[in-house]
Image (cartoon, rainbow, N blue to C red):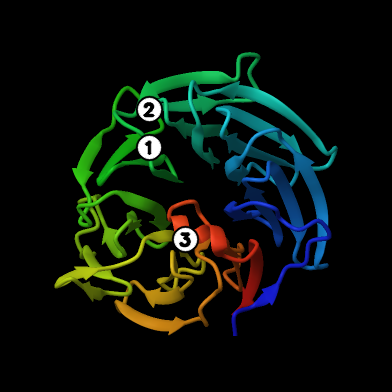
Amino acid sequence: MSGDRVQFENPIEDAVSRLRFSPESNNLLVASWDSYLRLYNVESSSLSLELYSQAALLDCCFENESISFTSGSDGFIRRYDLNAGTVDTIGRHDDIATSIVYSYEKGEVISTGFDEKIKFWDTRQRESLVFSTDAGGAVGCVTVSGNNLVVCVDASMHIYDLRNLDEAFQSYSSQVEVPIRCITSVPYSRGYAVGSVDGQVAVDFPDTSCSNEIKYSFRCHPKCRNGRLDGVCINAIEFSPCGSGTFVTGDNEGYVISWNAKSRRRLFELPRYSNSIASLAFNHTGELLAIASSHTYQEAKEKDEEAPQVFIHRF
């Protein structure tokens, strides 16, 4: 079963960039290239809010049930009051703002951009921008876990301690050896899982205190082309928050596959979706998985794909 399709009164007119569930409810944020941020209530199967932002939205995150943020193609970082239905700008990057996450440890928003900057914002301050540092290259993706921020540049991972941001305290090359497309934190350990542009997944445990954890990598859908092992881009990777070790991957050919990191086994594969898998998101209990079936502007053939759709898969 591919899940229940989310019905929007006004269809999403361009690529979905990010899905995010609220940390405490089944409210789902949908950011897309059509410049709209949508808030969907999965419990009532209804659209709660739709806000226009004047730029393609490339990422989004929640602060809490009433506040969220986006990063835009115009470089602006926007704050949304989901109760009042208002949007305001808290700052900007000098180029496209690519990624955004919220740190609950610091109470700050963290954004990255093609200007090769990592910026930290605190909307409780008069001047929202509280710190900025060089990333050393264009950032592909980021994740935050506790006091650790992981920034991926090409095939390298740079780990920052949010309590001391002078420089990354640990930098190393990922096992995938090609540009990293997506990253997520391992909820039961101090580790990270990444997906690459050539279909590889790697589970890393850079913290030496995790001596009982063994890093490993594998290919999701290996294919042999012209005598070479090849694969398609992994666009999304997400762990279930329940601590079972279950995680899912979504790729450019429309496959969503569930794996178990502890047993290192494939659990199941959902029926293939008509578009690429652009984003995945678990709800806070791990009982719901939101799936964005959408073009991602990575390949020319995507222009012939169907309109973007969002599905809810129930476990």
Rounded to the nearest angstrom, the CA distance separating label 2 from label 1 is 7 Å
Apparent side of residue 287 relative to residue 218 in the rendered image (left or right): right
Residue 114 placement (x, y as % from top left): 42, 30
The secondary element bearing badge 1 is classed as: loop
For marks 1 and 3 on the same chain, the one whose residue lies earlier in the sequence: 1
- Judging by the rendered image, the residue that carries numbered circle 3 is 301
- Judging by the rendered image, the residue that carries numbered circle 1 is 139
- In what quadrant of the picture does the C terminus appear? bottom right
Three-letter amino acid code at the position of disc 2: Glu
Label 3: how many Cα within 10 Å (few below 14, some 14–19, many 20+): few
Residue 137 placement (x, y as % from top left): 31, 31
Three-letter amino acid code at the position of disc 3: Lys
121 up-or-down from 157: above or below: above
Rounded to the nearest angstrom, the CA distance separating label 2 from label 3 is 30 Å
Residue 216 placement (x, y as % from top left): 22, 66
Residue 24 placement (x, y as % from top left): 67, 56
Identity of the residue drawn at 19% across and 70% down: 229
For marks 2 and 1 on the same chain, the one whose residue lies earlier in the sequence: 2
For marks 2 and 3 on the same chain, the one whose residue lies earlier in the sequence: 2
Apparent side of residue 253 relative to residue 167 in the rendered image (left or right): right
* Residue at the farthest left position: 227
Could you tell me if residue 246 is visible in this image?
A: yes
Three-letter amino acid code at the position of disc 1: Val
The secondary element bearing badge 3 is classed as: helix
112 up-or-down from 293: above or below: above
* Residue at the farthest top position: 126
- Judging by the rendered image, the residue that carries numbered circle 2 is 116
